[in-house]
């Protein structure tokens, strides 16, 4: 086990290779237990740099786990504790996502510095760790989410190159095949389409109340949905493909179908 920082806990998962304790943690509020699993990317040049930053008191951020590109897993906060990873965020009525979730940081430099696809060795580690956590805490597949899902106006990670489709096929997460984007697809105009999208996004869990039924904030929420569930074109445009994919996702959830 890595002894760079004082250790004060035992690993929660047998998959953990290193422990680096972060001081940026606390108790979960209102007696909440983890019901959400939030996936991030580090947005830093290396996992080592991310871990060093997350372990510094002055950073005021942390996470429960970091997964390197080779799949090596480091735990930084006990699962019983509240890590500071989600920030101002919302999902399905819950505003204190840090108290209701476990956060995994996945090494990737991010959109601002050479964003690239996540290697399969790393994705396998995400699958194994997320599956382990979800199984132990009975976290529903639809509650395995992107940082951009719970904070769409602030965050875009882990981004459109994260392979949610593969992960779902491996038994982790909720996903349906997106309705193909057609070359002729254009924005759906009028209140009927926007109101339908707003209602369905809200039903799934997105914080659409932070945005109007149109305009840049609503487009940003649409882009967050696309980034996770329709990554072929992330443009924030409410088109037929986006609306139909959202409808299929909700229908599958209502039928108890995790993957179609």
Image (cartoon, rainbow, N blue to C red):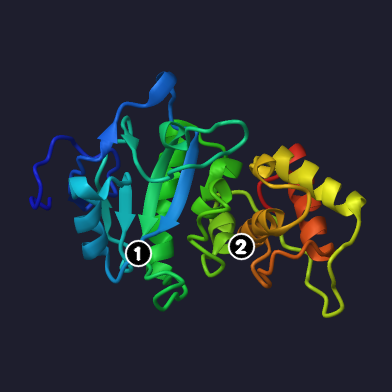
Q: Residue at x 41, y 78 (%)?
A: 114
Q: Is residue 176 above or below residue 31?
A: below
Q: Is residue 196 above or below residue 94?
A: below
Residue 255 bears which disc, if any?
Answer: none
Q: Is residue 4 above or below residue 161?
A: above
Q: Residues within 10 Å of mark 1 (few under 14, many from 20)?
A: many
Q: Residue at x 65, y 43 (%)?
A: 210
Position of residue 257 measured from the top left corner of the image (x, y, whole percent): 71, 44
Q: Residues within 10 Å of mark 2 (few under 14, many from 20)?
A: many
Q: Is residue 229 left or right of residue 51?
A: right
- Give the secondary structure at mark 2: helix
Q: Between residues 118 and 154, which one lies in front from this camera angle?
A: 154
Residue assigned mark 1? 107
Which quadrant holds residue 176?
A: bottom right
Residue assigned mark 2? 227
Q: Residue at x 91, y 56 (%)?
A: 190
Which quadrant holds residue 127?
A: bottom left
Position of residue 189 measured from the top left corner of the image (x, y, whole percent): 89, 61
N-term-proximal mark, 2 vs 1: 1
Residue 256 visible to an observer of this rendering: no
- Give the secondary structure at mark 1: loop
Toward the top, the furthest residue is: 31
Residue 204 visible to an observer of this rendering: yes
Position of residue 87 measured from the top left corner of the image (x, y, whole percent): 43, 44
Q: Is residue 161 left or right of residue 76?
A: right
Position of residue 21 measured from the top left corner of the image (x, y, whole percent): 18, 43
Spatial CA span between label 2 and label 1? 18 Å
Q: Residue at x 53, y 58 (%)?
A: 167
């Amino acid at each position: 086990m890595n002894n760079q920082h004082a250790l004060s806990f035992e690993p929660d998962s047998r998959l953990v290779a290193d422990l680096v304790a972060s001081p940026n943690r606390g108790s979960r509020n209102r007696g909440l237990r983890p019901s959400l699993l939030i996936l991030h990317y580090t947005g830093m040049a290396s996992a080592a740099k991310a871990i060093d930053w997350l372990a510094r008191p002055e950073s005021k951020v942390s996470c429960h786990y970091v997964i390197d590109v080779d799949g090596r897993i480091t735990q930084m906060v006990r699962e019983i504790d509240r890590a500071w990873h989600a920030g101002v965020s919302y999902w399905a009525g819950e505003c204190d996502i840090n108290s209701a979730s476990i956060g995994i940081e996945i090494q990737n430099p991010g959109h601002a510095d050479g964003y690239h696809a996540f290697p399969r060795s790393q994705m396998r580690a995400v699958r194994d760790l997320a599956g382990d956590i979800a199984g132990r805490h009975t976290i529903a597949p639809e509650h395995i989410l992107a940082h951009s899902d719970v904070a769409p106006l602030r965050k875009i990670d882990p981004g459109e190159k994260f392979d949610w489709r593969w992960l779902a096929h491996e038994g982790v997460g909720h996903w349906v095949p997106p309705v193909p984007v057609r070359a002729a697809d254009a924005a759906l105009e009028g209140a009927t389409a926007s109101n339908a999208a707003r209602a369905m996004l809200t039903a799934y869990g997105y914080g659409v109340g932070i945005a109007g039924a149109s305009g840049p904030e609503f487009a940003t929420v649409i882009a967050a949905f696309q980034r996770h569930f329709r990554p072929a074109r992330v443009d924030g445009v409410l088109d037929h493909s986006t609306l139909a994919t959202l409808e299929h996702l909700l229908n599958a959830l209502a039928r108890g179908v995790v993957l179609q």
